[in-house]
């Protein structure tokens, strides 16, 4: 099956530890991104509400309404390399994607940090339906992380 893709990247004037703190802790997402609520939870017997590593389940609710409701995404963390890499997949919720896999990569550079956030999913009819939204969302996410991380770095 063909895959659809969304991605964005940018350089951030902040240390990688600050950038990592924003992208690796879902409870901080509502502070910088388009979510009204986010937490660690369990879902169909999976996950650990206190864990942020592989196997943890994160629950996010959009701050925007679509068709009279706030969409929810339930994601399972697949891989983590502290301060560098996080991969997750959608395992539930109201976003109609199949075989969705996202990767967040934080790369230290001389005096800044490179952030790349990307995802692929099956090119089903419903997957194509959400492609435009996700294609627009990913640049917004990296920009929002950059703004918040740079703000925090200035306050060090």
Image: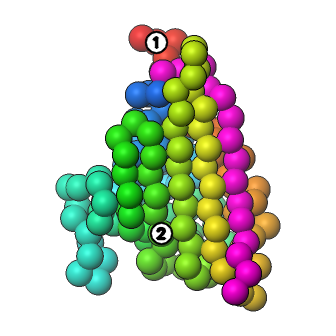
Q: Is residue 33 visible?
A: yes
From the viewer's perspective, tell me whether residue 6 is left or right of residue 14.
right
Per the rendering, the mark at residue 155 is: 1
Of marks 1 and 2, which one's residue comes earlier in the chain? 2
In front of the other: 112 or 34: 112
Above or below: residue 151 compared with residue 66: above
- Residue 138 picture location, percent across and down: 68, 52
| Highlighted magenta segment, given as a residue range | 1-15
From the viewer's perspective, tell me whether residue 55 is left or right of residue 13.
left
Nearer to us of marks 1 and 2 is 2
Image quadrant where one finds the C terminus: top left
- Residue 1 picture location, percent across and down: 70, 86
In front of the other: 32 or 65: 32
* Residue that carries the numbered disc 2 in the rendered image: 89
From the viewer's perspective, tell me whether residue 138 is left or right of residue 155.
right
Quadrant hosting residue 131: bottom right
Secondary-structure class at tag 1: loop
Above or below: residue 153 compared with residue 93: above
Residue depicted at 43% across the width and 68% down the height = 75
Residue depicted at 52% across the width and 37% down the height = 106
- Residue 67 picture location, percent across and down: 68, 78
Q: Is residue 126 visible?
A: no
What secondary structure do most residues of the magenta stretch adopt? strand
Q: Is residue 5 on the magenta stretch?
A: yes
Quadrant hosting residue 69: bottom right
Q: Is residue 93 on the magenta stretch?
A: no
In front of the other: 113 or 34: 113
């Amino acid at each position: 099956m063909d895959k659809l893709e969304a991605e964005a990247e940018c350089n951030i004037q902040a240390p990688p530890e600050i950038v990592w703190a924003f992208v690796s802790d879902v409870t901080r997402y509502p502070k910088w991104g388009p979510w009204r609520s986010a937490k660690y939870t369990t879902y169909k017997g999976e996950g650990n509400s206190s864990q942020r590593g592989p196997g943890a389940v994160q629950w996010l609710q959009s701050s925007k309404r679509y068709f009279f409701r706030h969409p929810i995404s339930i994601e399972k963390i697949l891989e983590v390399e502290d301060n560098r890499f996080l991969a997750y997949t959608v395992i539930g919720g109201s976003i109609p994607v199949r075989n969705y896999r996202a990767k967040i990569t934080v790369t230290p550079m001389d005096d800044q940090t490179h952030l790349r956030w990307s995802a692929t999913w099956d090119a089903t009819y419903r997957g194509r339906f959400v492609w435009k939204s996700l294609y627009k969302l990913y640049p917004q996410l990296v920009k929002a992380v950059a703004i918040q991380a740079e703000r925090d770095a200035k306050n060090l």
